[in-house]
């Protein structure tokens, strides 16, 4: 009898512990619904626990009476008592969802960031990459900025823009529809193609900080100077910073070249159309080269005019390259000034290439550049023809002969 009572006591404790564990789990699950829901869940679990205790006391009393009257059939009675009754229905734990009114959900406190979640709940949580407070690259903001996404689609190289923090910060604050779209439409009306917008904006990224009316005013000024729409589009494409210059500055630049070179209005216009960066670059190299042509190389003013209108890059060429080219052509090849003036393309050619071809012609006995003499070599063709044409039409030799000769140098 004492042994049976001890077993029943252990069974009662296990049932009580199981009920307590279930109540604890329900309490943790309901923590997401707030303190009110947790209290109700705990109260519900306590009620369930008391019901289990009442049933256990009744079962214990019934068991003692039955055992004293049927001691001869202890084993069979024990087995039958431990089996659950068919007529007895298991006690159901109330559902928390039905106990908490929906109108009280708005009053629940926010979830704690430290509140544990189940694996199933964690899978359903949508994860978004946080927006960095600061970064050294615009790539971290592309997913969060429609403006940057549109610029990338246009072909803008953000890696070059991000080297300028002020401009990068400006782009992040701009709205594509309000601040950028109107600039793009303006550039397209100006004549830039879709595939030209990306390279243009990569170089002149600061155009988004310009007032649209100021940009239109500068275009109107160029049109007043008889620059055609095609000319303006070509100038803007080749010199992206052109539109960032004020009307006063553009006017001063045009006046400088017209006065310094003593050119007509038409020739001045043709000059800057062919090399529009003359209007946007520094004037110091131009002034320096003008002195070099006149004082060091010995060209006359009208000769300089003729050369720079044919090859505008001569105004911005490297001073050392200019002097080396002239020294070899004039002092080694014995070509006088008036012939060089007729073929200024020679200043656009690498000195090394000029040396190779002249030495090969001298080796063949054909290094004659004076137009007044027979079988002379045109200086223009001498520097402009590719190797195959140069060997066939000027040197009258094969390319293999030319390459073999170069190995001997």
Image (tube, grey):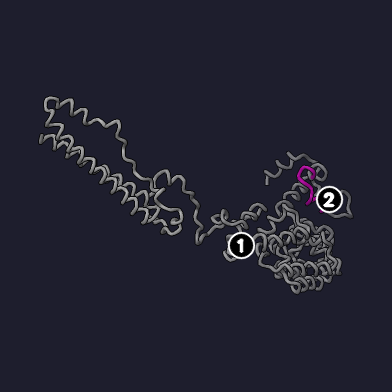
Residue 334 appears in the figure:
no
Where residue 167 sits: x, y (%)?
61, 64
Residue 93 at what x, y percent from top left?
Answer: 34, 43
Q: Is residue 146 visible?
A: yes
Q: Nearer the viewer, residue 234 or 103?
A: 103
The relative height of residue 49 versus residue 85 in the rendered view (above or below) is below
1 or 2: mark nearer the eye? 1
For the point 27% across and 32% down, which residue is it?
Answer: 85
- Quarter containing the N terminus: top left
In the rendered image, the vertical position of residue 143 relative to residue 278, given as above or below:
above
Residue 266 or 227: which is nearer the viewer?
A: 227
Looking at the rendering, the stretch of residues picked out in magenta corresponds to: 380-389
Q: Secondary structure at mark 2?
A: loop
**Residue 73: horizontal and vertical position, in percent?**
14, 25
Identify the residue under disc 2.
377
In percent of width and height, residue 225 lies at 84, 69
3 in relation to 183, above or below: above
Work out whether residue 292 or residue 251 is closer to the camera in this orientation and state it: 251
Q: Mark 2 or mark 1, which is nearer the start of the sequence? A: 1
Residue 18 located left or right of residue 340: left
Q: Quadrant of residue 12?
A: top left
Left/right of residue 269 with respect to residue 114 in the rendered view: right
- Asked if residue 147 is among those painted magenta in the image, a careful observer would answer no
The crowd level at tag 1 (other Cα within 10 Å; few <14, some 14-19, many 20+) is: many
Q: Is label 1 in a helix, a strand or a loop?
A: helix
The residue that appears at 76% across and 50% down in the rendered structure is 358
Give the camera-side residue of 251 and 171: 171
- Residue visible at 61% across and 56% down in the picture: 146
Say which quarter of the image contains residue 218.
bottom right
Q: Which residue is mark 1?
A: 171
**Disc assigned to residue 154:** none
């Amino acid at each position: 009898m004492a042994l049976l009572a001890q077993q029943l006591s252990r069974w009662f404790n296990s049932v009580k512990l199981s009920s307590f564990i279930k109540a604890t789990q329900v309490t943790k699950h309901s923590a997401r619904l707030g303190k009110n829901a947790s209290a109700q869940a705990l109260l519900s679990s306590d009620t369930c626990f008391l019901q289990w205790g009442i049933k256990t006391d009744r079962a214990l009393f019934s068991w003692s009476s039955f055992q004293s009257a049927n001691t001869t059939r202890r084993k069979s009675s024990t087995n039958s008592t431990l089996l659950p009754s068919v007529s007895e229905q298991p006690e159901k734990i109330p559902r928390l969802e039905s106990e908490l009114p929906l109108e009280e959900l708005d009053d629940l406190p926010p979830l704690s960031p430290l509140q544990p979640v189940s694996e199933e709940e964690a899978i359903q949580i949508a994860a978004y990459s946080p927006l960095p407070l600061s970064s050294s690259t615009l790539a971290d903001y592309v997913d969060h900025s429609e403006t940057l996404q549109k610029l990338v689609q246009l072909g803008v190289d953000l890696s070059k823009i991000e080297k300028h923090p002020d401009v990068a910060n400006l782009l992040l604050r701009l709205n594509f529809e309000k601040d950028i779209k109107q600039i793009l439409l303006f550039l397209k009306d100006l004549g830039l193609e879709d595939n030209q917008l990306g390279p243009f904006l990569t170089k002149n990224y600061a155009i988004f900080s310009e007032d649209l009316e100021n940009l239109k005013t500068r275009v109107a000024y160029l049109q007043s100077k008889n620059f055609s729409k095609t000319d303006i589009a070509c100038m803007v494409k080749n010199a992206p910073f052109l539109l960032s210059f004020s009307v006063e500055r553009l006017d001063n630049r045009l006046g400088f070249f017209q006065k310094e070179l003593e050119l007509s209005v038409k020739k001045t216009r043709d000059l800057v159309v062919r090399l529009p960066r003359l209007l946007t670059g520094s004037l110091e190299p131009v002034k320096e080269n003008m002195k070099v042509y006149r004082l060091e190389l010995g060209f006359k003013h009208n000769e300089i005019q003729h050369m720079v209108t044919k090859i505008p890059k001569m105004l911005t060429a490297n001073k050392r390259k200019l002097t080396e080219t002239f020294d070899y052509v004039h002092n080694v090849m014995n070509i006088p000034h008036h012939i060089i003036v007729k073929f200024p393309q020679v200043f656009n050619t690498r000195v090394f290439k000029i040396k190779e071809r002249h030495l090969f012609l001298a080796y063949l006995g054909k290094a004659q550049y004076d137009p007044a003499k027979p079988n002379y070599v045109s200086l223009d063709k001498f520097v402009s023809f590719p190797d195959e044409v140069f060997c066939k039409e000027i040197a009258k030799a094969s390319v293999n002969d030319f390459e073999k000769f170069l190995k001997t140098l």
